Amino acid sequence: MNPQRRQRAQISLALLIATSITLGMLVLALVLIIQSFRGLEAAKLTAARDTTEQLASAINDRLDAITKPQAIALRILADDPMQFSTTLDERLERLPVFASILQENDLVTSIYSGFADGEFFLLRRLRESDSTFFPDAPANSAFMLRTITWLPPGIMSVEIHFYDEQLRPLQRQALRDYDFDPRSRQWYRLAMESERTILTSPYVFFSTREIGLTLARRSMNGTLVNGIDVTVTELSDKLADLRLTPGTQLAVVNENNGVIAYSSPNSLGSNATDPHALTDLALLPDPTLSLIAHLSDQAEVMSFDSLGRTFYGFSVELDALSSDNLRIVIAIPADELLADAWASLALQTRIAAAIAVLLLILGWFLGNQVGKPLEHLTDRVGALSRFRFDTSVKVDSRIREASKLGTALDDMAKTIRSFQNIALTLNRSKNLDELLKEVLEHIIHIVGEKRGAIYLYARNAEHLNLAVNEGLSLTKQIDKVSRDADDNDIIHQLRTEISGHPIFAILRNRQKNLVGVLVIEMESGDQTRLSNDLIVFVDEIAGSAAVAIETRELIENQQALLDGIIRLVANAIDTKSPYTSGHCERVPQLARMLVDAAQASNEPAFQDFYMTEDEAYEFHLASWLHDCGKITSPEYVVDKSTKLETLYNRIHEIRTRFEVLHRDAEIRYLKDRLNGLNPEQARNNRDLRQQELQQQFAMLADANIGGEFMSENDIAQVRLIAEQTWQRHFSDRLGLSRDELHHLGSTAEPSLPATEKLLDDKPQHLSHWGDRIPPVTRGDPRNKWGFDMELPSHAQNRGEVYNLTIQRGTLTPEERFKINEHIVQTICMLDALPLPDRLANVPRLAGTHHERMDGKGYPCGLRSKDMGVPEKVMAVADIFEALTATDRPYKDGKTLTEALGIMVRMVAERHIDGDVFRLFVLSGVYRQYAEAYLSPAQIDKVDEEALLEPLYQMSR
C-alpha cells in the first residue's frame, strides 16, 4: 500500500475537547483521594492501638477487682475461730460467716478450709447452672456444704449438706468413694509455706469446669489453710462488650497461649485432651487469633489474612497477675476498622465522578458546537457504507455544500432502500397478489409517483387481466393481445385503451414470453418528454418483477402438482381395496380438525402447541400419505375375510374332499350290500358316517369365519378332523406354475393312488424369506429408521390346519406382519423422496400412527415421551375413522358411543394419549366429524361426562 494514501488515526473533535478537560480533573482527584485514604488508614490504626492499651488497663482493673476483696476476706479468716475447731459441730457454727462472703460477691464460687489432719470444710453457693453437677440437690437449695472428718477409730466420714437461703438444713447424706486430701493440693502447700496470701494461676475448676483463680492463706495458728475460688468467666463477657467492631476477636492468654477469656464465650470449649487444662489458643473454632499468638507487646501492628478476610493484629501485656505473664491478643477486621475510611473514599470518588461527568458534558457540548454538522454528516454517510439505507442523511447546517451533499445522499439512500424492498419482496413473498402489490408500490415510490397498475397475461384467452391497481381508473380486461406481438405493438394498443400520461413496461419471462404489463401514471415533471434513463430503469425493474412472477407461478404449479399426486396415491390405495374406500381421505380431514382444536386449546398439555404454516402443510401431507405403504400390501391379505382365504376361499377345496368322503361312504354302503351285509346295518353305517361328515364340515366352515376367540377344544377338534384320510388318484404336479413347482422343491412325488390327510400343513404351504428379509429388526444393519418389530420365521404359511386354528380373527402371524409392514413401507417410501427441509418430518408424522403410549406399538416401539402432539393426533384420528367406518368386510361401523367407549379402554391401556382423547371429546371434534362423514344411525347421544369419568379417576 502507498504510505501517502494510508489513512492516519483520527479522533473526534468533541471527544478530544471533552477528554482533555475530564482527564486532567480525574488525575487530580485520584491523587487527592489516595492521599486522603492513606491518612485515614494510619489514623485508624493509631486509634486502634490506643484503644487496645485502654482495653488492657480495663482488664487489669477488672482482675484486681476480682482478687483484692477476696485477699482481704482471707486475712480476716486467718484469725477466725475456725482455726481452733476440732469437731464438725464447732465448724458448723462458723457457717454464717462463710455464707456471708459468698452472698456479698457473685464471683466467689466456693470458700473452704483444709486442716492439717486432712479434714476439709467447703461451702459452695448453688446456681442454676450447677444442677448438672449436683442432680440430687433438693428443691430450694441455695448452699452445698462438703465435709471430711475423722471419726474414731480412724474412719473418714465424707458428707454433703444442702441448705436453703436462710441456712436451714434441707438434706444431709454420706458420700462414698470420695478420695480427696486437701493437703495434696497446690494451694494448700503454697499457703503453708508462705505467711502471705497466695494466688494460683488461672485454671479449670474440677467441679464446674469454669476458669478461675484460687486465693489461699494459712491461719494464724497454722492448723488450717483457708481458700477462696474466684471465677473469671465473666471476663469473657467483658471482652465481648469491649469489642471495637462486630467482627473483632479478643482473648486473654497466659504465657503458654492457654485461653483464660474469649470474646465469644459460647465458642470457648473445654480442652479435648485434658478437661482440667485451659483451651489452647490454636484449638479455638476460629483460627484467626492463633495466627498472632507470637506477637509481643512491643511488636508493630500486624496485617494478616484469615478465612478470606484481612485483619490487623495487636498484642498487649497485662500488669495483673504478673507472675503468669498474661496478655491480651486482638484481631480487628480491616474492612470493619476502615469502614469509615472506605465510606469517605467512596464519597470522594462519587464527588470526583460527578465533577468529571459535568466536565465531560461541558466539554462535549463545546466540542459539538464546533464540529456537530460535519460529524452528523459523517455518521450518516458511515451508515450508508454499512448498508443502512433506511437512515436519513439530511443535515441541518449553515454550510451550503454540506447541506446539498446531505440532500443528494438522502435521495440516493431512499432509492437504494426501495431496491432493497423490491429484492426482499421478490425473495420472501409467497402470495402472487401480495407480491405484485408490493413490487408496484416500491416501483412507484422509486419513480416518485403515486399511481400505477399491473396487468397479467392469460395465454390461452390472449387478453390482459388487471391484477393490481393503485389509484387508477382502468378497464378490468384488455382483449385481443397477441402472444406474438412485440413490445411496441402492445404499448401502442395499450395507449388506445388507457388515458392519461402512463409509462408502460412489458413484462416477459426467461423465454421472452409475455406475462404482463406494468403501468405507471406520470403526474410530475414534463409528461411529454420522458427520460430515456427512466424508461430503461423501469424496464429493468419490470424485468425482475416478470422473473419473480414466473418463479412464483412455477412454485404454485409445483405445489398444486404435488397435492394432486398425493391425492392420486391416496385415491389409488382406497380404490385398490373396496373395503377401505375413503380411509385415506377421511383421516386427513379428522386429523386437521383435531390439530386445529389443539392449537385453540388452553389446556396445559396444549398451551405451548402451535404449528407454523410450513408445519401445518407438512402435517397435511403426512396425513394424506399415512397409509401409502398399503400399496405394497397384497389385496388378499388386506381383504382376508376368512381363515382359508388367499386369492380365493379354500373352503371350497375342503368341501370337495368332504364330498369325496361322502361318496366313499355311499360306495362302502353299496359294497357292504353286495357282500351280503344286513341292509339295515349297512344303511345305518352309511347314514352315521355321512351325518358325521356333515357335522365336521359345518364345524370347519364355522371355524373358517373367524371370531373374537377360538377355544382349545375347538382347536383340538379341528386337528382330530384333519387326521382323516382320502385317496388321491391324480398327480399333484400337473398344471402347476413355476412358483408352485419351486415351493415343492425336491420333494418326491408319491405313487398313485396317494393317501392324503383331510386337512394338512404341507412343506409347500411355507414361503421362505430368502434374500428379501425386510429390515425391521433392531439389529439389522440396514435398519436406519429405528424399526423394532418381531419378524416371523416365514414370509407366508398357507397350511390348512395352521390357518383354521387361528384363535383370533382370520389373520396368521405372517399375514398380520404383512399388514403391519405397510407402515414400514410408508416410512421407507417417503424417506426415499427428495423432500425439502421444511417437509423433512413427513416420514415420521406419517409413520407413527400405530405407535402406543406404552411403547408396545410398531414399527419403532416409541413411548409417549418420544412423540409430539401431531403424532398422537394422527393415532387418534386413524383409530376413530377405522372404528366408525362402514366399508370394512369383517365388522359393522360403530356408533359414536361404542367407538368412544372402545377408545376409553385404549387410553386406560396406554394405547392412545389421554390428553388428546379428552380434547377430541370435549372440543366436539368427534361430533363435527360424525355429522360430515357418518350415517345418521351411527350418530347417537354421547354422555361425555360419564364417558370421561374413568379417565378422571385414573388421574386422581
Image (cartoon, grey):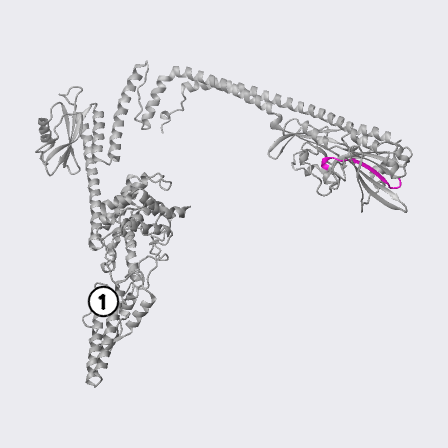
* Location of residue 360 in the rendering, given as x and y in whole percent from the top left corner: 46, 18
- Position of 895 relative to 133 (above/below): below
Residue at (23%, 71%) from the top-left corner?
A: 694
Residue 182 belongs to magenta span: no
- Position of 319 relative to 561 (above/below): above
- Position of 430 relative to 948 (above/below): above
**Is residue 619 shown to the viewer in this render?**
no
In the foreground, 290 or 710: 710
Outermost residue toward the top in this view: 398
* Location of residue 941 in the rendering, given as x and y in whole percent from the top left corner: 28, 46
Q: Which quadrant would residue 888 be assigned to in this image? A: bottom left
Residue at (9%, 35%) from the top-left corner?
A: 482
Outermost residue toward the front in this view: 680
Residue 118 belongs to magenta span: yes
Q: How many marks?
A: 1
**Is residue 560 shown to the viewer in this render?**
yes
In the foreground, 527 or 945: 945
In the foreground, 459 or 403: 459
* Location of residue 346 in the rendering, given as x and y in whole percent from the top left corner: 55, 22
Answer with left or right where residue 593 lies relative to residue 87.
left
In the foreground, 930 or 616: 930
* Location of residue 657 in the rendering, given as x and y in whole percent from the top left corner: 22, 72
Q: Which quadrant would residue 649 be assigned to in this image? A: bottom left
Q: Which quadrant would residue 4 be assigned to in this image? A: top left
- Position of 187 relative to 448 (above/below): below
Residue type at mark 1 is Ile
Answer with left or right where residue 166 lies relative to residue 352.
right
Q: Residues within 10 Å of mark 1 (few under 14, many from 20)?
A: some
| Quadrant position of the N terminus in the picture | top left
Which secondary structure, mark 1? helix
Report the residue marked by disc 1. Answer: 651
- The residue segment tinted magenta is 115-129
